Image (cartoon, grey):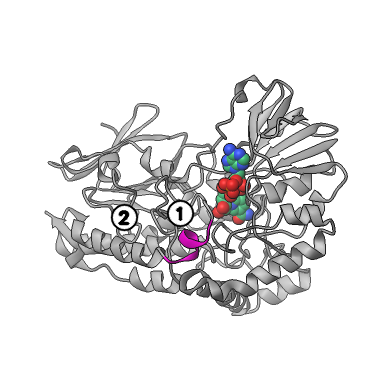
Amino acid sequence: MGEQPGIVIVGSGFAGICMAVKLKEAGYHDFVILEKAGEPGGTWRDNTYPGCACDVPSHMYSFSFELNPGWSRMFAPQEEIQRYLRACADKYGVTPHIRHGKTVTALEYDDERRSWSVTTGDGETLRANAVVSAIGALHIPKYPDIAGREVFAGPAFHSATWDHSVDLTGKRVAVIGTGASAVQFVPRIAPRAAHVTVFQRTPPWLQPKPDFAFSPRARRLLRLPGAARALRYGIYWALETRALGFAVHPRLIKGHERMALRHLERQVPDPGLRRALTPDYTIGCKRVLISSDYYPALTRDNVSLVTDAVTEIRERSLVDATGREHPADVIIHGTGFKVVDALTEQNILGRGGLSIQDAWKDGVEAYHGIAASGFPNLFFLLGPNTGLGHNSVVFMIESQARYVVECLRLLSRTRARALDVRPEAQAAFNRRLRARLDPLVWNAGGCRSWYLDEHGVNRTIWPGFTFEYWARTRRVKPGDYELIH
Ligand code: NAP
């Protein structure tokens, strides 16, 4: 048995860094962050595809305790977000706590010692009193299950593991998928490629992207006391109004649908193409995408949109459901991530050897998305049902990190060694959650998305306003936990 830190944080993306900052602020310095890669940053380190940027305004997609008046654009590009995260880790003294090249392969709770053993890929085992899983929801690339994928002769890669050694200049590129990532990289690669064939299974709802560069003067103004904070509040409340349609009734989001259809009409003159790009489900059912250059890219002469499913991949082509063959030199999978599996494929054993798979045999769930019964002192950040379709997940992460600190304080106050959420508290929380989710747009909007598990149950989205989540996680209710001495 190696090192024995008080707390182990797994992952050094937005969530892991936030947790570390909050721990230090509360006086907990005895922790390590185990990071599989050589750099912090999580999703913003991994995703380097052309055009990668956030789709929530940067002044909101950042920590409330580290405003950045210097954001270059309303929606900052990936490298800038990555720089911001690295700077946060340095400024708040988190960097020395990060141990790179450490892939956590197993977590095992020891009932006798009331502690966790944390095993990493290099065979090391650490013992810790508490573990915070900050692994992120979108990090395991999902490849489509298409016959012949392995016989393709050219380069083929996923948007999240972009192969920058492949020069797309003059190549025939096939793009599978039209989600948040694809709408960002298709406009960037289209001018270079000889031809881009975009395979669309479901058209996304797309709204204009109100992006612009902040002038040096605007950035100077944002440095005035209170200015960046005021802009953040403004953005927060503007985004929060979208929850009215998502969380209250889809009727309230009709205005957004009209805006998206006007955007399509303005940017796509061809009625056939427009028809192919018109969604047949309620807006918000899948993530609403924002882009002002995706539709124009699709109208280029060297770009074609195929709406028939890809049924086979051959050595130098893709075949669609009508039997038509589309030649390609390169395939780019913009096919998203294994979201629920990222949770269920973990190797975690809790009290009495309970595996996370057994605990979640009826579906992935947690209390406030943070604690799972049977797994004392294990906390999930961005866990089940804490994703958002309308605002910044960084806000959720901050609420969760503060909640974890409150749990640790409860332990100190009561001199308990561990706390385990009571099954009845977890069940009641999830019953209410399901009852709320059932009539809402993600479940009832007439689409299938990564928000739902294989049984069509929503395991990813928080069904309300973010301030409601913030209020609910402000205090820990001791009665909801079994305190283990
Ligand atoms: P995604 O939104 O899940 O999109 C995947 C796309 O691939 C969808 O169009 C999907 O079609 C399609 N697809 C999947 N399997 C397919 C198959 N077998 N054949 C044909 N098409 C297939 O993935 P993503 O674009 O990587 O984005 C994932 C999430 O990451 C987003 O929802 C967002 O939360 C986040 N993200 C954020 C940003 C940002 O902030 N800028 C950027 C990128 C991603 P269906 O719709 O029919 O399933």
User: 395 or 385, which lies in front?
Assistant: 385
User: 434 or 401, which lies in front?
Assistant: 434
Query: Within the image, what quadrant is residue 371 found in?
Result: bottom left
Q: Amino acid at mark 2?
A: Ala
Residue at label 1? 15
Single out the residue that lies furthest toward the front: 322
Answer yes or no: disc 2 within 8 Å of ligand 1. no
Label 2 SS? loop
Residue 14 position in % (x across, y down)? 50, 54
Which of marks 1 and 2 precedes in the sequence?
1
Residue 332 position in % (x across, y down)? 68, 36
Residue range corresponding to the magenta coloring: 439-446
The answer to whether residue 390 is visible is yes
> Quadrant location of the N terminus?
top left
Could you tell me which residue is drawn at 29 percent across and 33 percent down? 2
* Residue 303 is one of the magenta-drawn residues: no
User: 25 or 336, which lies in front?
Assistant: 336
Label 1 SS? helix
Residue 369 position in % (x across, y down)? 35, 57
Q: Does residue 115 appear left or right of residue 47 in this picture?
A: left
Residue at label 2? 366
